[in-house]
Image (cartoon, helix red, strand yellow):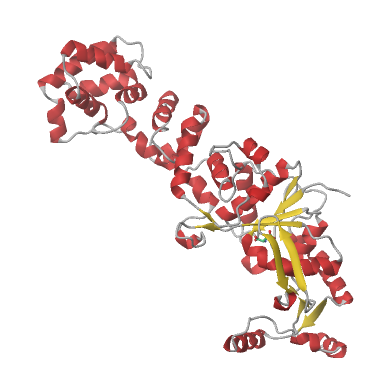
Amino acid sequence: MNNEVRVRFAPSPTGYLHLGSLRTALFNYLFARHNNGKFILRIEDTDQSRKVEGAVENLINIFNEMGLNFDEGPGIGGDFGPYFQSERLDTYKKYCDELLAKGHAYYSFETAEELEEMRRVQLTQGKQTMYDRRARQLTENEVKEKLASGIPHVIRLKVPLDSEIRFTDLIRGNVKIETNQVDDQVLLKSDGYPTYHLANVIDDHLMNISHIIRGEEWLTSVPKHIILYNAFGWKVPIMAHVPLILNPDKSKLSKRQGDVSTEDFLKKGYLKETLLNFMALLGWHPGEGEDREIFTIEELIGLFNIERVNSAGAVFNIEKLNWMNAEYIKQYDIDKLTELVIPYLNAGGIDTSDSAKTKRVVVAIRNYINKLDESAEQAGIYYKKVEMDAAQREITGTEISKQIFDNLILKVESLLEITIDNFKPVVSQVQKETGIKGKDLFMPLRLALTGVEHGPELGLIAYVLGKEEVLKRIKQVNQ
Ligand code: GLU
């Protein structure tokens, strides 16, 4: 008996990766890696009407970017391919025929109008809306005739009535449902394409999937799937349904409420490490006695345990995400961070050709930003020409200010360069020698260097600007 853990992420490509899907993929990935198993990407693209050009490429790019490497799937292949459902249509047809032959499925010929009418009547009677199983009554001959005359049809699952389906979900616990409430699900559509339910069950079986980890919205499909597994005589994989991600008002995190696509978060400059860390903790926690919030992906792999996923919905807290991203930015390798920040500076019109300066800028701004798209604004003072209004010019134009500037210029000129910590002592020296202190000392300097009253610490500003620029800016106001 092969006990290998094999899990899959099985998106229907919609053109973007919803954060909820990212989390599902991540949980699958962590589970696979924790258990030395396989993580498979399968594209569920049988709904032709929902096809989006480039969606799969986009998805694979994000997976690569996030480092969520799959072991089998589009592009890399594997022993259980093809990994696009649209390339497996013959297989679904074959298994559907098997169900028909064994009496677990049947033809149904209703038109869309008839189905709509059925629904309307059920609604007015206050009944559960579902297919009323009427085509089960057709005789073999009736079916033959209708098929022969080319009447459009679907193939439906023949749900065994008056019994109960029970299963244990690793997150939700024991679930049971009366089969009479289960719809005779369409398995094969009139265009010959399988529905999600049929294709999903067949593929999970044929791909030897051991555990199904997916969003809670699929929980209600499980009874249908179990009926299918039973009809085929196949083993049912272990299930784990992950709770929804919620807005702070407890509504479902959805596109209408703002950005939900992973791409958008990456674009805004949330680091991939932050997103992985944050999403992993959305509904999961490593356990008591663990109060850290920052985990590397390796640590997450080591700690991940699907049974610790909370069954209640997880609230998406953007403040926490911002906090976490800021933490990552502060600790990130400076060269790598600089590389990541450069496009944001360029987009803000900042010339980054002086790479030494760019790096100093990043050293300075990393403590002031939550996400990389705030970089250009924070970096502005290091690049923009200093402009002051009349009131500010008055401050820098006083006798006192002149004394400060004269004194400081001499000292800075004698420095080899301004380092991250040698400017402050210079200013203290100026204070000692001129007797000017506090705001009287700092404000003229700050204004001369930046043109604004507030901002990072002066020593940092001077370090970023560098000796030459510091002298240039001070001399400019000290004429
Ligand atoms: N194609 C389904 C989706 O879009 C897959 C659900 C499942 O994992 O079974 O989420």
Where 42 falls versus 446 (above or below)? Answer: below
Left or right: 123, with 449 as reference point:
right
Residue drawn at x 76%, y 69% is 165
Residue at the limit of the structure toward the front, as seen here: 289
Residue drawn at x 51%, y 31% is 332
Where 367 falls versus 113 (above or below)? Answer: above
* Image coords of residue 119 (percent x, y): 62, 85
Image mark count: 0
Please say whether residue 409 is visible from this viewpoint.
no
> Quick one: quadrant of the C terminus?
top left
Where 209 falls versus 320 (above or below)? Answer: below
Residue at the limit of the structure toward the left, as seen here: 399
Where 184 falls versus 94 (above or below)? Answer: below
* Image coords of residue 429 (percent x, y): 24, 12
Residue at the limit of the structure toward the top, as seen here: 414
Please say whether residue 236 is visible from this viewpoint.
yes
From the viewer's side, name the closer residue of 335 and 475: 335
Left or right: 122, with 233 as reference point:
left
* Image coords of residue 239 (percent x, y): 72, 57
From the viewer's side, name the closer residue of 58 and 210: 210
* Image coords of residue 116 (percent x, y): 62, 85
Q: Quadrant of ligand 1?
A: bottom right
Residue drawn at x 89%, y 76% is 101
